[in-house]
Each structure stands twice: as structure tokens, then as C-alpha cells.
Amino acid sequence: MRVLFVCRENTCRSVMAENVFRKLSSGRFDVMSAGVEIAEKFDETALKVLEKKGYPAVRRTPKKLEDVNLNEFDILISVCDETECVAVNHPRIERWNVKDPKGKEEKEYYRTLEIIEKKVSDLVRRIENEGT
């Protein structure tokens, strides 16, 4: 099973989701994240919050969606609440509509991470149940 998380710039929400998924699935499934647009680097506050919660980021640079072969992924999760992500097409897409904490107080990043942790936990459980 291969999962791709997508957000606008691949700096915060999709990075959080990728790293949470990697840890909660114990590496049993392939996971990656990408952005519709691309920024120069990951959001430093997002990385700090991930690491404080025990999710060390594996990759340290954003990836652009156009550089990814969508057909290689079984599930695509759009974590965006912005309209830019609506145009992403995939036969098995889910839209989580998570608000972007970028540029806000650190507590907003923790709130975002909590939302993502719950959604990713549910996703991992569903994927595991598909295999049984």
C-alpha cells in the first residue's frame, strides 16, 4: 500500500501527515508527501512540533506534486482546505480539509497535529482492515 499526502506547499500539513503515518504504520506501508506548489524549505515550527511529539522528519526538503507519479500511489490524501488542492485527480482520493497553521502561534501547529494524528490513526486502521 502506497499513500501520498498533498497540501499546497508541502511544508507543514502534508509533512506532518507523512511523518505521523510513517510512525503509526510502523513503516509497513510506503508514504510520501508533496505540494501543489513548492516552497524552499519545510516550516521550522512544524518540524519543531513534530520532533517534540516524537515524529522526527525523515525528509527535509519539499517535493512538488508534478514531480510525483500519482499512479504509483494507492491512496491520495489532500489535507488542504484551499481550493488549489481540489484540482488533484486520483481514483482513490480523500479530502481532509485541514486548516493551515503556517505563520500562526505554535499552539495552532499542535492543534493541527492533533487533528492529523486522529485522521491518520483512522486511516492506518482502515488500511489494516482492508488487508484482513
Image (spheres, rainbow, N blue to C red):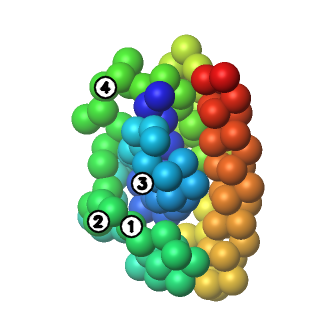
Disc 1 to disc 4, C-alpha distance: 22 Å
Element on which disc 2 rests: loop
- Residue on which disc 1 sits: 57
Using residue 36 as the reference point, say whether residue 128 is left or right of it. Answer: right
Q: Is residue 82 above or below residue 109?
A: above
The tag earlier along the polypeptide, 3 or 4, is: 3
Depth check, mark 1 against mark 4: the one in front is: 1
Q: Kindly identify the residue that appears in the image at 63 percent across and 33 percent down.
A: 128
Within the image, what quadrant is residue 30 found in? top left
Three-letter code for the amino acid on which mark 2 is drawn: Arg
The tag earlier along the polypeptide, 1 or 3, is: 3
Three-letter code for the amino acid on which mark 3 is drawn: Asn
Element on which disc 4 rests: loop
Q: How many marks?
A: 4
Depth check, mark 1 against mark 3: the one in front is: 1
Disc 2 to disc 4, C-alpha distance: 20 Å
- Residue on which disc 3 sits: 10
Depth check, mark 3 against mark 2: the one in front is: 2
- Residue on which disc 2 sits: 60
Three-letter code for the amino acid on which mark 1 is drawn: Ala
Q: Is residue 49 above or below residue 121?
A: below
Three-letter code for the amino acid on which mark 4 is drawn: Asn
- Residue on which disc 4 sits: 69
Element on which disc 1 rests: loop
Labelled disc at residue 97: none
Q: Are marks 2 and 1 in contact (CB under 8 Å)?
A: yes
Q: Are marks 3 and 2 in contact (CB under 8 Å)?
A: no
